[in-house]
Amino acid sequence: MNLFTPLSWNDTGFILTGILNTVYISVIAIVVGSLLGLLIGFIRAESNKTVNVCLGAILDILRSVPLIIQLILFSTFIGVMGFPLPPFVTGSIILSLYTMAFMSEVFRSGFNSVPTPMIKAARSLGMNYLQTVRYIRIPIGMRAVFPSWIGVALSVIKDSALVSVIGYMELLRTAEQLISRTQQPLMILIGVGLFYFMISYPLSRYGKYIERKMEI
Amino acid sequence: MDNYEFHWNVVFDAFPQLLTGAFTTVHVSVLSMLVGIIIAVLLALGKMSETKVFYHIANIWIEIARNTPALFLIYMAYFGLGAYGIHLSPYVSVFSALVFINAGYLAETFRGGFQSIPKTQYSAAKSLGMNSVKVYRYIILPQMFRRIYHPMTNQFVWSILMSSLGILVGMNELSGETQRLQSTSFRTLEFFMVAAVMYYVITKLVLLAADLIAKKVFKGEIS
């Protein structure tokens, strides 16, 4: 009796679920992480040194502890607390916070890149503080850091593969399960790699293209 | 939270093992960084070379390393190569995946650093009577090294953090060791908290050392 059934067309749906889940959690992490990062970046660009150092220290923890440890720690922690959440929620929370830590740095340098005379000019034209933020600092500052934003977003898509450790069925985990059934690791893994490459490569080319365009 | 009691004694008893794990983590990252740098120089030269073959090999390597997840490459080394009858140990598969990625990222850093130095400086140094070796030794390389130093430290920290993926292939570095220890004592939370703190400390120590070296070598003139 053959215990290992080969890869068949019935598995397409399974793989598709994995692909969709990967895309889903990456998009959530990038959107939530960017919004939080924008807020934190703005606070850090505006606040005094004491606040800055405190915020920086907290964000630093998120950046200097491996994502995989954060995921395991958080999912065990909420389990111990008595609020077990589904892997998708746990994964999204940690991945978003992780993204936020990197995005806040990107956006902070974006806010700082807007020259002060430009803001003063806007104020002298009668804009209030919020208007300078809305019409001057965000559009100009964010444009300057767009290539770095793409870079962080790409690394989040790649890091989303780690959410598999807490049981979220993303692409790499579905592949792993297929491998254990079909015993054809190479073919399946190459397929998975190609998929990540197909998402990541065009984006990174686009980032480089924008960067080059901005230099000129 | 009320019905959970922290038991730190188990963790303190196992601390020597955790330290051994931390040593393996540093070990594999340092080694993967050193080998990665050597390959990265070759790749950067390949990417700038006129020969089409070298250019394409370097380009493919760099793009694969930059555009696929680290975990995928570790799986590729650990499970994928098994299909060809090449069975790598967890250490070797994590190490080779890290080398592959480090080389890809650093190659782009090196190329960027090299190209950021204007060609006119080369001509200027030549016109002052320096020969090629001297131009590189005194003009090009010191400036280039200053520019790539910071990205290189970042890459090193990245390797330390990413070596934690060894947990998934049963490698005995810090997180793998933590996983093994918690599975015998069921003190998951305590063990992983200690591991997180240890990673934080290792990262900070590396950055501190990098800063001190930079101050000593570049005398504060780092770009």
Image: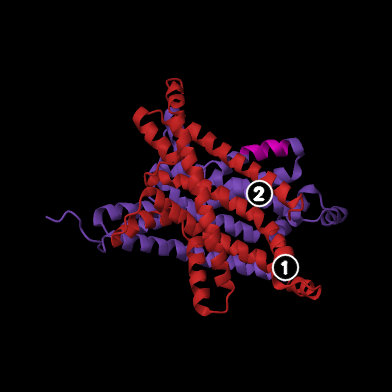
Chain colours: A purple, B red
Near-viewer residue (A206 or A127):
A206
Q: Is residue B183 visible?
A: yes
Q: Using the image, tell me which numbered label, if any, was put on residue A151.
A: none
Q: Residue at x 35, y 50 (%)?
A: B89
The C terminus of chain B - image quarter: bottom right
Q: Position of residue B13 (x, y in %)?
A: 43, 24
Up-down relation of residue B173 to residue B107 (above or below): above
Q: Using the image, tell me which numbered label, if any, was put on residue A105.
A: 2
Near-viewer residue (B154 or A211):
B154
Q: Residue at x 76, y 38 (%)?
A: A49
Q: Position of residue B162 (x, y in %)?
A: 49, 48
Up-down relation of residue B161 to residue A8 (above or below): above
**Which residue is farthest bottom?**
B51
Q: Residue at x 53, y 49 (%)?
A: B30
Given the image, what chain letter belongs to the residue carrying mark 1? B
Magenta segment boundaries in residue numbering: A51-58
